[in-house]
Each structure stands twice: as structure tokens, then as C-alpha cells.
Amino acid sequence: MKISHNEFYEVLTQAAFQLQRNLKEAYDNDYLEGYLSEIGMSDLLPSKEESFYETFPDGKIVIIGDSSVKTNDIYGIFKSYGLSKDRVELVLDYNEAEKYQYKKMNYNPNYRLVLFGPVPHSTKGNSGSSSILSEMENEEGYPKVVRLTNSHNKLKITKTNLKMALQKEIAQEYIEI
């Protein structure tokens, strides 16, 4: 569909306004890095110094957050990508996520990736941060964090976003099979 020059500038103006609003919301909720990554603009962030700390490519993958996806379905997804269920640690209950010992992953190279769904803001281990998510995303020594979100950028664990996250990390050779 071809639109007129004036219509294009109207679309451009509205898109810029929406993008600005989304960026502000992501910044206010300590999710700017994740949002920019989702829309393919993570290169706009100032580069962080490369860390000397690295985790094992065949390390554990932790899934944390309230989920309606069945445990066996999650294990099946991992198996379909050639990943052993021994590498998976599941914390799928909201209350369990609140009490989980997040600090055990700090500077522990055996933990490679953390996939987050909905978790309580107040948890053990978020030493002064607004949430454990922002703590783990911004503090040195934690494994890589990926937010599992729905189409409205709300945290949600689904079979589809779990598959997409694993597929991406495997394709980028971040996760070793």
C-alpha cells in the first residue's frame, strides 16, 4: 500500500512519539537495555567494559517466574534443542521465586543463562535494587539475563517465547549443546 508524502510524515511523527514513550517507560522501569535489545537498537547504549568474568557455555539454564507452562513441556522444549534436562533449573512458582537464593548464581560459572518471567519485586537478594531483575542485569558477576515477554512487553513465560529465547542463544553460540 502506497501512502502519500503527508501521510508518511504523520506516521513518522506518531511512531517517533510512541517510541519515545516506550523508551521512557522502559527507562523508568529499569528495563531500557532489555527494551532496546528487543527492538534491535541495543547498539545505542554506551558500551560496558568487557568483563573478565565468564560463565561456562554448557552451564545451567535457570527459568524463574510464575508459569502456566507444564514442567514436562519445558523439558520437552529443551530436549528438542538437544539440551539435557539436567542443565535446567526451574523456579516456576511465584512464592518460590520470592524466596529463591539468587546470590548463589553470583560469580558462579556453572550458571550460564537466566530466563525470567513474572517475579515479585521484593525478593531475597536484590540488595537495594528495585527488583532482582535489575540487580542481575546491572551487577557484575551474574549470568546473562533474558526477559521472557508477551506481545505487550509484559513478563510472561510461554512455550513460544521460551523456544525463541533458546533458539537465539544457541544460534549466537552462547549456549553450548
Image (cartoon, helix red, strand yellow):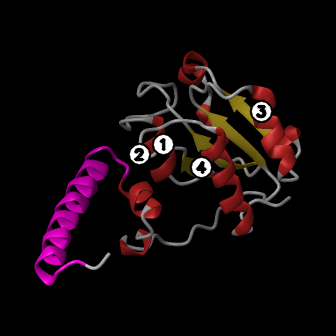
Q: Circles 2 and 1: CB distance less than 8 Å? A: yes
Q: Work out whether 75 lies above or below 57.
A: above
Q: Secondary structure at mark 3?
A: helix
Q: Earlier in the sequence, mark 2 or mark 3?
A: 3
Give the quadrant of residue 57: bottom right
Q: Identify the residue shown where x is 50% and y is 29%.
A: 119
Of labels 1 and 4, the one closer to you: 1
Residue 89 position within the rendered picture, expressed as x and y whole percent measured from the top left: 75, 34
Question: What's the CA distance linking mark 1 and mark 4?
Answer: 24 Å
Q: Earlier in the sequence, mark 1 or mark 3?
A: 3
Of labels 3 and 4, the one closer to you: 3
Residue 106 visible, this angle: no
Question: Looking at the picture, which amino acid does disc 2 mark?
Answer: Asn
Q: Identify the residue shown where x is 40% and y is 56%.
A: 35
Q: Which mark is residue 150?
A: 1
- Sort mark 3 into few (<14), some (14-19) or many (20+) by Cα contacts within 10 Å: few
Question: Looking at the picture, which amino acid does disc 1 mark?
Answer: Asn
Quadrant location, the C terminus: bottom right
Q: Circles 2 and 4: CB distance less than 8 Å? A: no
Q: Which residues are magenta?
A: 3-31
Question: Looking at the picture, which amino acid does disc 4 mark?
Answer: Tyr
Quadrant location, the N terminus: bottom left
Q: Which mark is residue 153?
A: 2
| 94 in the magenta segment | no
Give the quadrant of residue 92: top right
Residue 58 position within the rendered picture, expressed as x and y whole percent measured from the top left: 83, 55
Q: Identify the residue shown where x is 13% and y is 70%.
A: 10
Question: Looking at the picture, which amino acid does disc 3 mark?
Answer: Asp
Question: What's the CA distance linking mark 2 and mark 4?
Answer: 23 Å
Q: Which mark is residue 73?
A: 3
Q: Which mark is residue 142?
A: 4
